[in-house]
Amino acid sequence: MFVISCEDKKPDEIETVLDWKNLNLAEDWQTGKINVEGIDTESLEKGINHVKSFSGFYSMAIVYKGRMVVEDYKNGNKNSKYPVWSVTKSVLSALVGIAIDKGMIADEYQKLDSYYPNVADSLKGEITIAQLLTMSSGITDDITYLAAAYPLQFILEKDLLYPSGTYWNYTSAGTHVLSYIFTAGTEQSAKTFGDTHLFSKLGISDYSWSQDAYGISNGGFGLDLKLRDMAKFGQLFLQNGQSDGNEIISSSWVNKSTEMIVPFDASQSWGYGYLWWTAKVNGVNIYNALGYAGQFIFVVPSKALVIAATSNSLPVDGYVDDLYDIIMDKIVSSFSVLNDQ
């Protein structure tokens, strides 16, 4: 299914303006058209067609000013759940923020040994939640932890790559340690907590999240989500954590977690926040949740834009980079920066 509409609008077909900063995200999406002010329709169509030509492409949704203007399924349909891989990390980051907002976790500067004093040695015990959120814990990235009889011990018995807080190194094992801390602080798995405090508030009920032998939600990957629900998660961040006037995540956490805390180059054109990737493309700030093989949620606040995409988990060489470049250079650029930005 490919839902975009380019026919000329009649006066009585003009779309009402939505309060896209405060949608009720528990409700289903309202759809819209792409031949409206602020969208270069021809450029957008070219970008979409380019993406669709990739053999690894599965699905894409584009939400502009609160309306779903594109919904395309090359593989699957609106009821399909897709493995989003490391997009899971950005969801876990949001749940950590909610737990801090609610006082269940004091702040992101709490140390590992505050929760597991008998598991970690003195060096690893100094690892903070913030270091786990920014991939600067020093924990090695060994994703076989899920098969271990004692996953936390399996991860922490390995030597650190470097002292915590000194360098950036991507590690799914580190975010699984974060999931353990989360459960110790909230006395609930991330999935159980998320059911109550996040997913249900977004109208998300049909999803799955894998867990380890101790019932700890996989902190590195393991979420399966519908495309429309991926877009809802992105829209929640675009709305600064609000839905229909109710706070789900504090705006302070939304801003903190999506800012560039760890720049990857001198020009700060791309970097990392609290389990979110950040970038500046053609002067426009963008942040995204990124999963293995081409699973994305892009949020572009200055354009009121959210893009969700899924892909085959067995990618062709170069596909992910090509997909990312087309989304950035062809699709995002088809939308104008809002006048009030």
Image (cartoon, grey):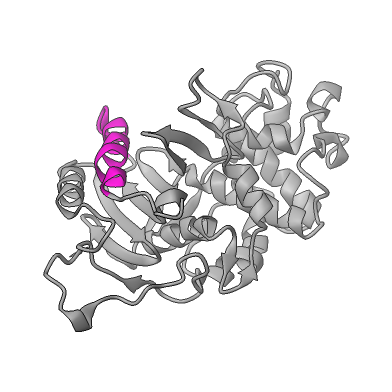
Q: Can residue 77 be seen in this snapshot?
A: yes
Q: Quadrant of the N terminus?
A: bottom left
Q: How many marks?
A: 0
The reply, left or right, for residue 179 in relation to residue 324 is right
Percent x, y for residue 255? 61, 47
Image-based side of 49 in relation to 215, left or right:
left
- Where is residue 126, by image quadrant? top right
Up-down relation of residue 241 to residue 158 (above or below): below
Please tell me whether the stretch drawn in magenta is mainly helix, strand or loop. helix
User: In the picture provided, is 16 more to the left or to the right than 280?
Assistant: left
Q: Is residue 42 above or below residue 14?
A: above
Looking at the picture, does residue 328 appear above or below residue 200? above
Image quadrant in which you'd find residue 113: top right
Q: Give me the residue at 31% from left, 66% from top.
A: 78
Determine the residue located farthest toward the left in the rendered image: 7
Viewer-proximal residue among 108 and 43: 43
Q: Residue at x 48, y 46 (%)?
A: 87
The foreground one among 319 and 153 is: 319
Give coordinates of residue 327: x percent, y percent.
29, 42
Q: Position of residue 328 (x, y in %)?
A: 32, 39
Tell me if I can see residue 150 in this picture. Answer: no
Q: Residue furthest bottom?
A: 12
Residue 330 is a magenta residue: yes
Q: In the rendered structure, which segment of residues is drawn in magenta?
A: 314-334
Residue 326 on the magenta segment: yes
**Whole-percent x, y for residue 132 in the image:** 67, 34
**Which residue lies at the image location 59% right of the left edge and 36% below the top edge?**
273
Tell which of 23 and 127 is nearer to you: 23
Residue found at x 64% / y 55%: 251
